Image: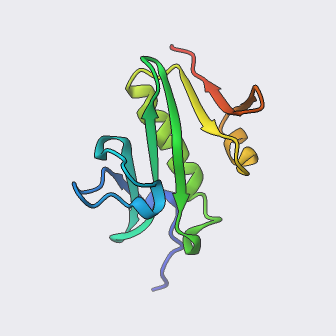
Amino acid sequence: MTARHRTYRDLVISPPDEGNIPGCLVGPGAAVADVREARLDGQLVGAYRIERLGETRFRVAAVVVVPVWRRRGFGTWLLRHAIGLAESRGARVIDAPLADAEAFFCASGFAVHCGAGMRLALTPE
């Protein structure tokens, strides 16, 4: 039997254990409630961090995939999971840093906002 190619659908995305936030990926000082890590067979593949900026405004502070796992759709899956988490907490606007990931964010509906970053406006159903 051959091993099948692992995809984003195989990821387990969950909050990190208390005191075990992957700071090397999402930066220091993040709260467990705002971080999600992605694991594949128990191995850390990536993580994201969101921040509340206002009642209905959030920011995706980080979306990072471990280099060996890149170019497989894991980053896109993590970003869309982050959008879903922010929306479940009441987000109507989600900001993201412009940095050098413009195409990555645009592919998920973000647009350049005032040249300072990216923005996704959510419309309630």
Please identify the residue farthest to the bottom as the structure is shown.
1
- Return the x and y of residue 87 as percentages of the image width and height: 45, 27
Query: Which residue is found at the position 27% from the left and 61% from the top?
Result: 20
In the rendered image, the vertical position of residue 70 relative to residue 75, given as above or below: below
- Return the x and y of residue 63 as percentages of the image width and height: 54, 51
Query: Which residue is found at the position 46% from the left and 18% from the top?
Result: 56
In the rendered image, the vertical position of residue 33 relative to residue 78, given as above or below: above
Horizontal side of 58 relative to 33 (left or right) equals: right
Picture quadrant of residue 18: bottom left
Picture quadrant of residue 96: top right
Horizontal side of 32 relative to 1 (left or right) equals: left
- Return the x and y of residue 34 as percentages of the image width and height: 36, 41
Picture quadrant of residue 94: top right
Task: State how many labels appear.
Answer: 0
As rendered, which of 84 and 120 lies closer to the eye? 120
In the rendered image, the vertical position of residue 7 relative to residue 92, given as above or below: below
- Return the x and y of residue 118 as percentages of the image width and height: 68, 34
In the rendered image, the vertical position of residue 89 relative to residue 125, given as above or below: below
As rendered, which of 97 and 1 lies closer to the eye? 97
Please identify the residue farthest to the left as the structure is shown.
18
What's the colour scheme? rainbow
Query: Which residue is found at the position 50% from the left and 50% from the top?
Result: 78
Query: Which residue is found at the position 75% from the left and 46% from the top?
Result: 103
As rendered, which of 84 and 99 lies closer to the eye? 99
Please identify the residue farthest to the top as the structure is shown.
125
The N terminus appears in which quarter of the rendering?
A: bottom left
